[in-house]
Image: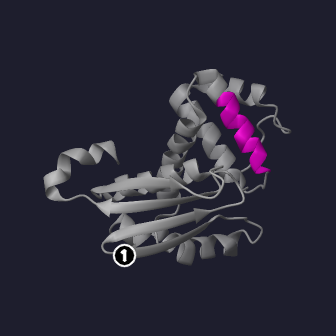
Amino acid sequence: MKGIVFTELIEMVEDDLGIEIADRMISTSGTSNEGAYTAVGSYDHAELIQLVLALSDQTGVPVPELVQTFGRHLFKRFSQLYPQFFEHAQSAFDFLPLVETYIHVEVRKLYPDAELPTFDCGIHEGNLTMHYQSSRPFADLAEGLVRACVDHFGDEVMVVREDLGDGNGTEACFCLTPVDQHRHGEVQAYV
């Protein structure tokens, strides 16, 4: 897993919860390098899991909630660091299909050793379906990214996640459905 994911997690914790919590997360996680990550390095994804488990112990926040929050943070950072990926999209429906066909292609050019999840998108009857599959259990991270994408573009859509496979976070389906004007008040429960 690319180091930018690790450095962004630590930065998010420092900014949102303070340096002391970040230090305790790192010191109690039992990671092999004691939190010394570089954005361009590659690290075992199990270390990210260790960090999040330690953060959950420190804060009392459930792991899925932490990982989804981190996904939201990552999307915001990616939009700041890589604005060229967002230039031609006006909505989540425009952007999300580009993840696999454009963004991951560009990432692989920069980092040929990157092991990325796959996202298979399709639009049917006005709904966008996004199938996530990975060797790593990060469907919660994907959900945070998807929900942040919806927020970024200001779309009024319901996002529904269905865990697939063994339900271990390596496979999920996200369905994005536009919210009708008469249901406008319900959108906050889903987005």
Which residue type does callout 1 highlight?
His
Residue 172, how many percent across, how many down? 56, 58
Q: Quadrant of the N terminus?
A: bottom right
Query: For the magenta stretch, what is the residue range?
Result: 44-55
Residue 184 makes an appearance in the image: yes
Residue 87 makes an appearance in the image: no
Residue 46, how many percent across, how many down? 77, 45
The image quarter in which residue 125 lies: bottom left
Question: Image check: 31 left or right of 14?
Answer: right
Residue at the spot 80% in from the left edge and 50% down from the top edge:
44
Q: Residue furthest front?
A: 166
Residue 185, how many percent across, how many down? 19, 45
Tag 1 residue: 124
Is residue 49 in the magenta section? Answer: yes
On screen, residue 110 above or below 75:
below
On screen, residue 64 above or below 172:
above
Residue at the spot 34% in from the left edge and 66% down from the top edge:
91
What count of labels does the image hold?
A: 1
The image quarter in which residue 58 lies: top right
Is residue 57 in the magenta section? Answer: no
Residue 97, how many percent across, how many down? 47, 73
Q: Residues within 10 Å of mark 1 (few under 14, many from 20)?
A: few
Q: Main secondary structure of the magenta part?
A: helix
On screen, residue 123 above or below 66:
below
In what element is the residue under mark 1? Answer: strand
Residue at the spot 38% in from the left edge and 64% down from the top edge:
92
Question: Image check: 138 left or right of 98?
Answer: right
